Image: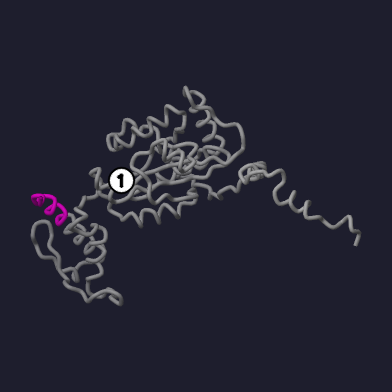
Amino acid sequence: MDSSSVLSDEDYDVISNPGQRSLESSIADLHHIPALTTYELPPSEAARERLSTVALSPVDVQAYVQNALNASSAGIYPRDNRTLRVYVDGIFDVLTVGHAHQLRQAKLSFPSVHLIVGVLSDEQCQAHNTTPHFSHLERCELTRHCRWVDEVLYDAPWIVNDRFIIDKRIDYLALEEGSSVNPEFDKERLKGYDVAKRLGRVLPTRMTAGLTAVPVLVSYNASEDIPPFRELAEMVLEQPGHNTFTHPPPKTSTTTSADNKTLDLEALGAMEALEAMSNELTERCARKQRQPTRG
């Protein structure tokens, strides 16, 4: 072997750290490599006809965001191909089709996006008069399995501020249009977005029209009761004939209707029995809400 083909120690030093460059600058050289795209199944024709945002292509989404940012006083649509970190937060109780399309638009807002989704905790929700029907753990797990999500933030703050944006290296916050006039959107949370808007760091996502109205669920006192859905599941498990391999034996085979009539669940069909138990559960929650609050 020719001795000239053997690398010296100095050659290795140049290869391992040429010019003492930082890791960040070395990674920046990789931005010309196209980002991995998320595979998306095509929507059905029925979904295209009914849901307003289904047919939006990545080009449509990016053009809309670009126009919105360029029209704002402080925002400018970035021209480079670097991966941008976009943040969306919410309660996601439960994760609906509307949420999924919002996350899709946030993910497609730039050619390369790392989408971070913050899921607000049970304690934060209860402190602001909102009680989730599903636990924080379950809501995080459901969000984690959405194809558009790259990272789930389990300790998301109720209000975003500049310190949070800097610490998490967030480039943009995604906010659904109409949130500022939505009476159900917490006003304190909107204040945090207003600060980011002034910095040109909020991008809009379009609301999906054509969705089925989300049913109003009866709230509960988390300090005393179990979630209504879990209580209903336990009522089902208690019925005769159900596989109780990992559950205790059935406690009762009857339930009480809204007019205080005792119903024999064994004599009812499956759907009628489930409806009867659901009605009883709704009445239980209503009675608990009417009870005076204990100081």
Instruction: Say how many tags the image has.
Output: 1
Q: Determine which quarter of the picture holds residue 243.
A: bottom left
Q: Determine which quarter of the picture holds residue 268.
A: bottom left
Q: Is residue 21 above or below residue 231?
A: above
Left-right relation of 122 to 26: left
> What sort of colour scheme is used for the picture?
one colour
Residue at position x 78%, y 55% in the image:
9
Q: In this view, does 122 lie above or below 266?
A: above
Left-right relation of 262 to 205: left
Instruction: Using the image as rendered, state which of residue 153 and residue 49 is in the foreground.
Output: 153
Q: In this view, does 156 lie above or below 201?
A: below
Q: Is mark 1 on a helix, strand or loop?
A: loop
Residue at position x 31%, y 43% in the image:
213
Instruction: Using the image as rendered, state which of residue 62 and residue 210 is in the foreground.
Output: 62
Left-right relation of 269 to 57: left
- Rendering coords of residue 125 (x, y %): 28, 46
Q: Identify the amino acid type marked 1.
A: Val
- Rendering coords of residue 53 (x, y %): 46, 38
Secondary structure, magenta segment, majority class: helix
Q: Give the range drawn in magenta.
A: 283-295
Residues packed near mark 1 inside 10 Å, few (<14), some (14 to 19) or many (20 plus): few
The answer to if 294 sits in the magenta stretch is yes
Instruction: Using the image as rendered, state which of residue 239 and residue 159 is in the foreground.
Output: 159
Residue at position x 25%, y 43% in the image:
128
Residue found farthest to the front: 9
- Rendering coords of residue 232 (x, y %): 24, 61
Residue at position x 24%, y 67% in the image:
236
Residue found farthest to the right: 2
List the residue tagged with mark 1.
Answer: 214
- Rendering coords of residue 34 (x, y %): 64, 44
Left-right relation of 156 to 27: left
Instruction: Using the image as rendered, state which of residue 246 and residue 14 is in the foreground.
Output: 14
